[in-house]
Image (cartoon, helix red, strand yellow):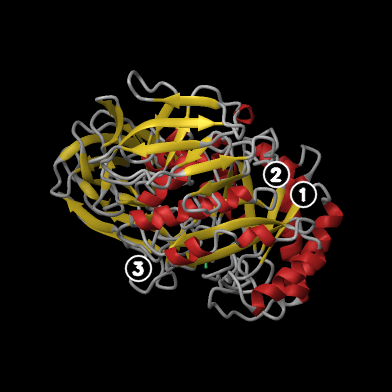
Amino acid sequence: TNRTINVNAAGTGASIDPTMYGAFYEDINQGADGGIYAELVQNRSFEFNSGDNQTYTPLTAWDILRRGSDGTAAVVNDNNRLNENNRNYLQIDATSAGEGSGAGVGVRNSGWNAGQKLEAHKKYNYSVWARTSNPAGTSLAVTLETPEGGRLDIATIKIKGDRWAKYQVNLSPKSSTGAGRLATVVQGTGTVRLDMVSLFPQDTWNGRENGLRKDLAEKIADLNPGFLRFPGGCIVNTGSYDTYSAPNYARARTYQWKDTIGPVEQRPANRNFWGYNQTYGLGYMEYFQWAEDMGAIPVPVVPVGVTGCGDNKSAPDQATLDRYIQDTLDLIEFANGDASTEWGAKRIAYGHPEPYNLDRIGLGNEEYKPEFKQYFTQFYNAVRKAHPEIKIIGNTGPFSQGPEFDDLAKFNADTGVDLVDEHYYNEPSWFLNNNHRYDSYDRNSYKVFLGEYASRGNKPANALAEASYMTGLERNADVVKMASYAPLIANEANTQWSPDMMFFNGTSVRTTPNYEVQKLFMNNVGTQVVPSTQENPASTVQPIAGRIGLSTWATSARYDDVKVTGSDGATLFSDDFSGTAAAWTGNGTGSWSIQDGAYVQSSTTAQNTMVTAGDTNWSNYTLSTKATKLAGS
Ligand code: AHR
């Protein structure tokens, strides 16, 4: 079937911001520890607790070793602890010295998934906080090994005294494994205390210390996100309002950003809403840095005193609410303040002299309880007053439509928020049927941040439904200012939510058709929408400036005589594919080639767009196109 797209050469549609598309990262699906946070040791500070997950003990992922020596190893919580936020530690009492390389009493960590991914000859940074009752005669033997105990590398660390100190050594395995183990044993006798036993690949993404797992972070950076929304999602607006302090050292606390900055050994662990321990090793400093390294703007979301996501904790009293409001103001100061401010000075002291240039903040996630409006208003007023330069993002609960949605939409409009965070997960048909959702939004009211959306599935048809829907987002780019698919990543061994954009295990990452659609759109954000209609059959299509949508381009098909014309009929561009197709770049998961004077789609996955390459000043183009599917193909 021939298709004709008419483009209004004189017309100007909405401008599209470079921050139109972004990544929404939440620590769901074991996304941080055991995920994108590159730490290879699971339960490094012995803080796992049955309050995090009933299968946990303080020795989860650890085995006790007695290699040619005697003694005991146990997790202890007493006044000898490393610090008040890191209460457990491992106490090893070695009663015999042990002879030979690697002999001693100690522990071995099995890492995440099948084990630690260790690559031959690459460097790994081992660190540990330790103290010993026998400074004259104690060292640690640290071994990288296979599950069977085959040694890949060994190093020795001398422990110098009975005060907590951090010790570090580099290791480099002689061969690769996806099931590595890390053993630490005491050589000598005496009482040795250990905490924060850590192993990081030196090769983290962008070379950051305490950084991100490279393969996973690369896939996210490849999306070219304009923004990074973090840290959630439901981990933001669930949990109690307690602090980590005596007498309860509460688990399942609402996400409190101040818990997540500063030296990692001083960040208190928490129970993640999704049912596991979170160390906060990946915390707000790391999120801001990650966004900066990707060239994305940071979009933090903070709790506003209302529990959601089915988590019914009691409402905070006003004093607690005030603390949360102050925390929100402090976060803005932490991100942007200079050395004269309390929280700006902290950021500088932690190693980031420049501001993070925070320009917007999300207040709440999927909030709809009766108390929400009253609480939100307090946060809203405080932020507006102290920081009129910051855009405020409200939300409309977990609804795409209905009375609650309408009620919250009106509330947001009346309040005067800058953007509203909408979330919806629906069937592909919903996305196909709702392409025009934003056509009727009030142009004089708030803008939309579509912070979470996905069609229910990871099949190519889901991805196409999302691609189709995204053309509607772009057509309405004057209203829809930001959009992010969700969730972003999932550990195959601990997935709470499906679908997801990417799946990983300990050694590899698997992307989905949904990922490819996001990548295609996110790497080809136009600057301005060019109004268009489609003939035969008539329908509205949305070619984006510079991008030509051809929904009929099928798999394993041959095409010829593609034309790009202005509305006056003049041909701006044509290709009969008799030579090279220099002006075209195939996109999507498939490959394109020119054979026998035709452009051949040889992939098994349908792709529906092509992008002109070269001149990226898309406003030079007003496009129409006609593709002829060759007979017999
Ligand atoms: O993206 C998964 C979850 O969906 C988020 O945590 C929450 O905001 C939404 O309900």
In the rendered image, residue 114, in percent from the top left (x then y), is placed at 23, 53
- The residue singled out by tag 3 in the image is 57
> Looking at the image, is mark 2 or mark 3 nearer the viewer?
2
Q: Which amino acid lies under the numbered mark 3 shown in the image of this protein? A: Thr
44 on left or right of 113:
right
Residue type at tag 1? Ile
**Do callouts 3 and 1 mark residues in contact (Cβ within 8 Å)?**
no
Residue 627 on image: x %, y %: 40, 37
Q: Residue 267 lies in what quarter of the image?
A: bottom right
Which disc is residue 288 wearing?
Answer: none
Kind of residue at disc 2: Leu
Counting residues from the N terminus, which is met first, the one under dot 2 or under dot 3?
Answer: 3
What percent of the width, then of the height, locates residue 622? 60, 33
Q: Where is 505 relative to 122, above or below?
A: below
Residue in the foreground of this view, choosing between 72 and 288: 288
Q: How crowded is mark 3: few (under 14 residues within 10 Å), some or many (20 or more)?
A: some
Residue annotated with mark 1: 390
In this rendering, the answer to whether 289 lies above or below 489 is above
Q: Is mark 3 within 8 Å of ligand 1?
A: no
Circle 2 is placed at which residue position?
A: 358
Q: Which of marks 1 and 2 is nearer the N terminus?
A: 2
Considering every residue shown, the one lying at the far top of the view is 579
At x 54%, y 73%, the residue is 309
